[in-house]
């Protein structure tokens, strides 16, 4: 297969544009390397989640390290997506869903009464399994978040922000002459990159990705994986994936779930080469799952 | 069943004769179903075409009316200080009499005047006051005269004479002295065919030498009778083909128009005084007891005012209620109860809403009787469940991924609904709303209860003026005895249908525009 002929793959891979042109307020704050290893960005402590009478998560505790990609893996129905949706409280929209335990972000309990869920979701962005751009123009898709959060003062700043973000996901060169086109008119891979652009446009600190590549072909998947690797510099990423190879390729930490319990977590290399739990071993080697 | 376990049977399970037969039976069932479906559609389209066709055919005569262009002597109102005080009755009467100087005597003159609408003087006065310097004023004919000219009142058959005839005149009376046998037989047949006395007998009019002789007796094979119009030619002989026998099978007593009036009308048409024109009265006037002066404009305005109120109340309330119930209300016993009752409300007969309007709006709150705004409120109550249900279905059809996407970028629930969910659901909500409005436009029963069935001549000028609405107007006209009202109610039905089609067209347009904006 001739990869260079694929519409989404430029013949010569476009270098990620330098962030020189970006106004400073859109840039992620520089992090000191020592900070990376020291404190977890998010902690999950003894979390139980149930939907009505069915318990989906049992006593899960997990640390999310900053500026790393954390993969949540496990067979279908093991609760990994449930945990992901707890991290930005998307589970709030499910009426019978009940969450107990403690989830903190920078040391603050995100389920505390004083936490504004709208603010939380602005700080914890999310990309969904199926690309779900708004049925509006490409421009509006990206500009919507910054606009409702009042991140820009005028049209010029908003335009600059949209351009920066679209460059960041490598979409600008492909769509810069048709920003008025509906986001839903793009190809699947482009739509997913648009959704990532939409998620990072509000400058979240954490990016949650729920199987972001499962609806895409291998080439679009490769582009997104590449992108995730670069986004790690700016954001902390938590990703649910069904693809063991994907988890191995792009994540630094991996957590394995089974039947609603966190079986094992650790550095990705360790989980894949030397898992402590036999169930993990069976799963990552493809014997069960 | 047991033989299916045998391996050989599996190999032939879909090819053996029994299976073939089963397959053939399935195809037959499908063909049968298709045939019934096509037949049902064909039948309903046929009935629809029949219904529409009969309405259009019945309505067409009402869109034109015959007007008489007479020479009106308008010197009196021109000289008067106030033209409104002039005696337009006399002006119209005299203008018509000038055309028929031979018509003498009270009875005949009254018969002549009856050709014109009784509202002709008023109509003339209005035209004159609108443009006093104008000329060529016309006045409408009476409904019966108009119907006769459209061929809807009395049918006649005409026999062109095959032989010559000689006619005589003595005073008012005349006779055909010599007629050839075939022509005489034609007259005899018509004369004796129905039997009975004069007035119960078919009218036989001999059109000869520019005059019209009505045959009243047939003594000694000499047809004789009264001249309804004197012959204008001199001499006493007519060539074959130059005179005609005209027979009205409906006797004079059973018609709204006498033989004399028919002769006068034919003359007015022949000399170009009476001409059909677009029936502007029908489109611009309110109710009237005279069919020729009755119009739908009052009802159209009443309908429009009521619908404006209905839309202004039902759309925001209905959509708001649907949004609250679908997006915000916590599911539970209470919200299920409300939902079930909204569905029940949609099935309540509309007259109940009318009774509610009468009992609560008129009797308790003392709002205006017959007022469009009260009608609008009642129709809004009636339309509300329809809009709520349509809006809830439309909101439910918006994919959840849109909501999640909006919430995930930090939109508040309200922003999510108004920025993303509602725009996406809007086309379907619009369609539901327009269906509800169309139903409200065609609604009669609840408006009867709140007095919008009143006979209102004036065009309503505001929401509190007494008014009626199109369907009620149709209902009233269909009840009136005059035949001309029958045609007018068909025409009003057509106008109502045009409005409904226009509304549906608007719905399509709005929908198309929304969908274009989205893609």
Image: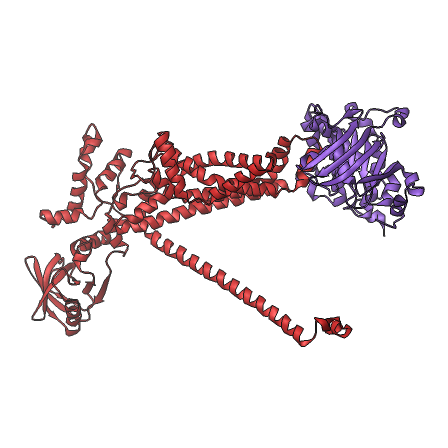
Chain colours: A purple, B red
| Residue B147 spot, x, y in % from top left | 26, 53
**Which quadrant of the view contains residue A39?**
top right
Viewer-proximal residue among B169 and B127: B127
Instruction: Give the total of numbered labels.
Output: 0
| Residue B514 spot, x, y in % from top left | 58, 41
Q: Which residue lies furthest to the bottom in this view?
A: B17
- Picture layout, residue A190 above or below residue A108: below
Look at 53% across and 38% down and name the residue there. B338
**Which quadrant of the view contains residue B439?**
top left
Asked whether the viewer can see residue A205, the reply is yes
**Is B87 situated left or right of B476 in this image?**
left
Viewer-proximal residue among A199 and B250: A199
Asked whether the viewer can see residue B276, the reply is no
- Picture layout, residue B65 above or below residue A69: below
| Residue B53 spot, x, y in % from top left | 39, 57
**Is B502 situated left or right of B1 in this image?**
left
**Which quadrant of the view contains residue A131?**
top right
Q: Residue furthest right?
A: A274
**Is B234 situated left or right of A72 in this image?**
left
| Residue B266 spot, x, y in % from top left | 21, 55
**Is A215 situated left or right of B225 in this image?**
right
Q: Residue furthest left?
A: B170
Viewer-proximal residue among B79 and B384: B384
């Amino acid at each position: 297969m001739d990869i260079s002929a694929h519409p989404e793959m430029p013949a010569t891979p476009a270098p990620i544009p330098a962030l020189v042109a970006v106004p400073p307020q859109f840039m992620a704050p520089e992090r000191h390397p020592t900070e990376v290893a020291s404190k977890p960005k998010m902690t999950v402590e003894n979390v139980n989640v149930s939907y009505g009478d069915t318990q989906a998560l049992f006593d899960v505790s997990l640390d999310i390290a900053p500026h790393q990609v954390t993969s949540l893996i496990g067979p279908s129905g093991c609760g990994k997506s449930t945990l992901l949706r707890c991290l930005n409280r998307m589970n709030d929209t499910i009426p019978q869903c009940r969450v107990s335990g403690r989830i903190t972000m920078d040391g603050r309990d995100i389920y505390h009464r004083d936490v504004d869920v709208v603010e939380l979701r602005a700080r914890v962005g999310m990309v969904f399994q199926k690309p779900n751009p708004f049925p509006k123009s490409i421009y509006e898709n990206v500009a919507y978040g910054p606009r409702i959060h009042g991140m820009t003062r005028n049209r010029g700043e908003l335009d600059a922000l949209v351009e920066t973000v679209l460059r960041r996901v490598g979409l600008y060169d492909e769509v810069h002459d048709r920003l008025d086109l509906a986001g839903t008119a793009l190809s699947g891979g482009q739509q997913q990159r648009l959704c990532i652009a939409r998620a990072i446009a509000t400058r979240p600190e954490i990016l949650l990705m729920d199987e972001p590549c499962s609806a895409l072909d291998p080439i679009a998947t490769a582009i997104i994986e590449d992108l995730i690797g670069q986004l790690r510099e700016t954001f902390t990423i938590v990703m649910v994936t069904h693809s063991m190879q994907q988890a191995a390729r792009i994540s630094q930490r991996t957590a394995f779930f089974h039947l609603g319990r966190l079986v094992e977590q650790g550095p990705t290399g360790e989980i894949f080469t030397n898992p402590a739990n036999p169930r993990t071993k069976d799963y990552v080697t493809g014997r069960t799952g | 069943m047991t033989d299916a376990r045998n391996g050989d049977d599996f190999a032939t399970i879909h090819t053996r004769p029994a299976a073939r037969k089963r397959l053939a039976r399935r195809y037959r069932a499908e063909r049968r179903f298709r045939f019934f479906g096509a037949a049902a559609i064909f039948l309903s389209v046929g009935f629809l075409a029949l219904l529409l066709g009969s309405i259009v055919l019945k309505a067409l005569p009402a869109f034109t009316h015959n007007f008489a262009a007479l020479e009106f002597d308008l010197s009196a109102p021109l000289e008067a200080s106030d033209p409104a005080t002039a005696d337009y009755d006399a002006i119209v009467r005299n203008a018509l009499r000038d055309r028929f100087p031979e018509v003498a005597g009270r009875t005949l003159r009254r018969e002549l005047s009856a050709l014109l609408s009784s509202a002709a003087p008023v109509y003339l006065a209005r035209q004159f006051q609108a443009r006093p310097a104008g000329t060529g004023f016309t006045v409408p004919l009476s409904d019966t005269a108009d119907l006769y000219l459209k061929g809807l009142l009395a049918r006649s058959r005409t026999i062109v004479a095959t032989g010559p005839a000689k006619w005589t005149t003595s005073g008012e009376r005349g006779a055909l002295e010599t007629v050839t046998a075939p022509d005489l037989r034609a007259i005899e047949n018509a004369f004796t065919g129905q039997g009975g006395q004069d007035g119960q007998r078919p009218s036989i009019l001999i059109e000869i030498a520019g005059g019209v002789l009505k045959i009243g007796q047939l003594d000694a094979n000499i047809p004789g009778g009264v001249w309804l119009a004197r012959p204008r030619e001199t001499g006493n002989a007519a060539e074959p083909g130059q005179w005609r026998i005209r027979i009205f099978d409906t006797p004079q007593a059973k018609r709204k128009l006498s033989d004399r009036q028919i002769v006068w009308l034919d003359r007015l048409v022949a000399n170009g005084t009476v001409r059909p024109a677009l029936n502007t009265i029908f489109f611009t006037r309110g109710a009237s007891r005279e069919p020729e002066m009755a119009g739908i404009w009052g009802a159209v305005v009443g309908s429009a005012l009521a619908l404006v109120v209905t839309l202004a109340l039902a759309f925001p309330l209905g959509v708001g209620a649907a949004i609250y119930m679908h997006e915000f209300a916590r599911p539970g016993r209470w919200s299920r109860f409300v939902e079930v009752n909204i569905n029940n409300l949609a099935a309540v007969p509309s007259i109940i809403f009318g009774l509610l309007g009468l009992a609560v709006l008129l009797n308790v709150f003392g709002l205006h009787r017959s007022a469009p705004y009260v009608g609008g409120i009642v129709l809004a109550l009636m339309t509300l469940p329809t809009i709520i249900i349509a809006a809830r279905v439309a909101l439910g059809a918006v994919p959840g991924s849109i909501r999640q996407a909006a919430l995930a970028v930090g939109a508040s629930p309200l922003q999510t609904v108004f920025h993303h969910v509602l725009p996406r659901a809007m086309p379907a909500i619009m369609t539901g709303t327009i269906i509800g409005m169309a139903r409200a436009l065609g609604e009669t029963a609840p408006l009867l209860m709140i007095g919008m069935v009143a006979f209102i001549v004036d065009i309503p000028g505001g929401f509190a003026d007494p008014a009626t609405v199109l369907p009620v107007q149709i209902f009233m006209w269909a009840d009136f005895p005059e035949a001309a009202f029958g045609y007018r109610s068909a025409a009003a039905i057509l106008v109502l249908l045009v409005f409904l089609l226009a509304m549906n067209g608007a719905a399509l347009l709005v929908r198309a525009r929304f969908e274009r904006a989205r893609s």
